[in-house]
Image (tube, rainbow, N blue to C red):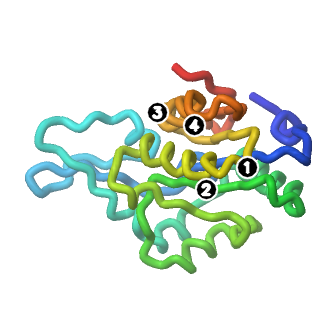
Amino acid sequence: MLSFKEYLKEDVASGSLSIFDIDDTLFRTKTKVHVVKDGKRIHSMTPAEFNVYDLKPGESFDFSEFRSSAIFYRTAKPIGLVFRLAKQMLARFKRTPQKEIAIITARTDLDDKQLFLKTFKKYGFDIKRVHVHRAGNLGMPGPAAKAKIARDYLNSGKYTIARMFDDAVGNLNAFLALKSEFPDVTFEAFFIHEDGTITRHQHG
């Protein structure tokens, strides 16, 4: 596990991009992904289980609960270490516009934007300073969608450091693969374990 200081010791003058996931990274929720076959739900799983589930013939995913702001607001609980880290970074970088913090979630648009944002505010997270990108709207696999959004940021040329915090190895690998397109950027990937601890991830 890494300490807060390892994330915050960089030169304040350098440009950096820090990307956080939501589900099982910033928050733990009771939102479920359902597996559907022949028009019926046959299985429900957590976001962590979804990350490693392979659809069988005839199956499809039902993400309807992930569009519900009410479920998110009612059940979301901050994951202590990661959530505190994100809040500390927001506070430390408040007056340094060259340091950007973004949220990239695999979710699509939720049904009540204000209630969704109110969840962050409830726990003291300054969400008005962070853009939430819904990678699920792009209509492509999650890792590719998240990498595309990160690429759009990096194309600005403003950043010398780019880091991602996520609980899905596939997302982290797709992010680290951008290094070949941006050789002058230092990439850092951090895996969020089920117990909320953080470890540095190397492309695998």
Question: Where residue 136 sits: x, y (%)?
Answer: 40, 56
Report the number of discs. Answer: 4
Q: Residues within 10 Å of mark 2 (few under 14, many from 20)?
A: many
Q: Is residue 36 left or right of residue 83?
A: left
Provide the residue designation for mark 1: 158
At label 2, the amino acid type is Ile
Q: Is residue 140 left or right of residue 171?
A: left
Q: Callout 4: few (<14), some (14-19), or many (20+) C-alpha neighbours within 10 Å? A: few
Indicate whether 193 appears above or below 39.
above
Q: In terms of depth relative to the viewer, which is nearer, 44 or 87? A: 87
Residue marked by disc 4: 194
Q: What label sits on residue 170 in the rendered view?
A: 3
| Above or below, 163 relative to 137 | above
Label 2 vs label 1: CA separation?
18 Å
Instruction: Inspect the image, locate mark 3, and give the three-letter code of the amino acid beneath it.
Output: Gly
Residue shown at 27% from the left, 56% from the top: 62
Residue 89, x across and y down, in percent:
81, 52
Q: Which residue is mark 2?
A: 103
Q: Tell me which numbered mark, 2 or 1, is placed earlier along the sequence.
A: 2
Please indicate, yes or no, whether residue 117 appears anywhere in the rendered image: yes
Q: Is residue 189 left or right of residue 139?
A: right
Please state which of the two labelled residues, at mark 3 or mark 4, is closer to the viewer: 3
Mark earlier in primary sequence (3, 1): 1
Rendering coords of residue 47 (x, y %): 44, 46
The quarter of the picture where residue 50 lies is top left
Marks 3/1: CA–CA distance:
26 Å
